[in-house]
Structures are given as structure tokens and as C-alpha cells.
Image: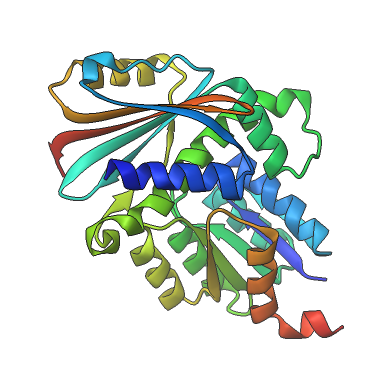
Amino acid sequence: MIPKLMIQVRKFLNEDMQIKIKDEIVEFNDTESLNFVKDYTSAICTDSETVSVIVMSFDKSVIKYLVNHFMGGEEIKEEEIDVMYSSMADEVVNTIVGLFIPSLPDKGKGVKIEPPITINDILNLKDLKELKESKNRAILNANIVTNVGTLSISAIDTNIKK
Amino acid sequence: MLNILIVDDSIIVRKQIERIVTHLGHHIVCSAKNYEEAMSAQSNYDIDLVTMDITMTGKNGVTTATDILAKDANIKIVMVTSHGQEDMVADSLKAGASGYILKPITEDKLSNVIKKIFPDEWNL
């Protein structure tokens, strides 16, 4: 699962967004080590036999670049910047997970993805804390350094039955 | 020039589609973030084409497309979707949607699907 997810991350960044990857640090950890410290963070759940959670966290500079790319260089209004940046984080994780699903066994048939969740308020942080404290398994943390900033991706297989 | 309604709960996707369809020479009548705004727009504007997000919170894109087509079967609807939502795409097409595009959205993908649905628009 993990190498295939990383293939889609690279493909999205390099080919779709023209972002150059300078370095990748991929580690397998437990949930205790989850640490989303970047400026914008978004999570998405996939449902198959068990529920998986994929979390992506971005430096503001990465999100700023992506918004500019999506907008074709058009300026955005000052009052819309924060909501646009959060929306961008959601959209990236949604798109990458969508691209990843067909690489799963049986082309991901039966795997569904839920709408992304922005992790920026107390409720979501509480959920994240519970996730970290639960006895989950199969954690991937990848830190990706690019020419426009750093992003991280964590994939968590929760063992939670659908 | 087509009159286009954009329906998507993501502001960045609405803005991206607005930019692309404007660049393609079409007119955006409204950019709606949910079912209610979409249905209101249908009541207030003449619409040729709708781009419809498939997984909106609240009533989803399949329901919204179905209800729009129930009021006006001549409107063409393009579903905007990610992989992993094939069942919903199938439901949308059964309900009468004219096509779909997979994310990431690009100008080429959007112009190609519009060209298929409205071939005459490109010969004017």
C-alpha cells in the first residue's frame, strides 16, 4: 500500500503541479509518533474492510504555491486567503487518495473515500488525539522536501471495522 | 457561449472551474456550494451546463443532479469526481448526467467533455 501511495504523491507533485521533490524521509512508526506540525493539515478516511486514515500536512509556502497553480496566477482576495488555503489542503489529499485507490487490489473496487476534514479546530484536534492514543497499526510517516516547502503524509490503518 | 452553473462545496475547486470555463469563453451564471444554492440558481437562471461535485456534504451531487434534471431534463450535467466514487458516478449517469471528469481538473479535461456534450458550440 505505502509504496503505491507514495507513487501517487510524487506523480501529483511532479507531473500535475510541477513541484520538484528534493528529498524524502519515509519511516514506519506507531501512532504515538504522529505529529502534524505544519501550517495546514487535512485528513481523509477510506472505507473498505477496515477504515484507513490518510493525513497530509503542508507548509504554508506549499499551499500558497498550489493555490497559485490552481488559480493560474490570478490573485485572490485577502479575506478569502485562509479559507482558500484550507480548501486547497483538503483538495490535495482528496485528489491524491482518489488517484491511489485504483492501485489497490481489485483496482480498489468497493473502497470508498469520505469527504476530507480540515484539522484546524478543537474538535478535530480532539479526534486526532484519540487517534494517536488508540492502539492502531501500520503507520507510515513520509516527510517530503520540495522546491516550494515541506509537506508530510501519514497513512494509518486503524483496524476499525466498517 | 454556454451558461454554466458550478456546484462544489470546495471553494478552491469552484474558483478553479470558474477560471477555466471563463477562459474557455463561457458564462458562469452562479457558483453554488451546496444543494440549496444549486436549486435556487436553477430557479433564477437559464442554464445550459452544470459542473457537479459528486461528494458534497449535505445532499450529495447525485441527488442534486437528479433534482435539477427532474425540473429541466434539457440541462446537461458533468460530474466532477475522484477515483473511488465509481458507484456514485454510475448512479449519476443513470439519473441522466451527460458525463464526468476525474480529478485533478485540467482545462483539457473540461474542454473535452464540454466538446463531447455540445459539439455545435465548437463549430460556431
Q: Which residue is at the far front?
A: A22
Asked whether the viewer can see residue A114, the reply is: no
Asked whether the viewer can see residue A129, the reply is: yes
Colour scheme: rainbow
Q: Is residue A64 above or below residue A110?
A: above
Q: Residue drawn 70% across and 68% down?
A: B111
Q: Position of residue B104 (x, y in %)?
A: 56, 53
Number of dots carrying numbers: 0
- Name the image quarter holding residue B88: bottom left
Q: Residue drawn 42% across and 67% down?
A: B89
Q: Nearer the viewer, residue A65 or A148?
A: A148
Q: Residue drawn 46% across and 42% down?
A: A9
Q: Nearer the viewer, residue B90 or A32?
A: A32
Q: Nearer the viewer, residue A101 or B51?
A: A101
Image check: B56 left or right of B85? Answer: right
- Name the image quarter holding residue A135: top left
Quadrant including the C terminus of chain B: bottom right
Image check: B39 left or right of A139? Answer: right
Q: Position of residue B61 (x, y in %)?
A: 48, 58
Q: Position of residue A67 (x, y in %)?
A: 67, 36
Image check: A138 left or right of A122? Answer: left
Q: Position of residue A56 (x, y in %)?
A: 43, 30
Q: Residue drawn 29% across and 35% down?
A: A53
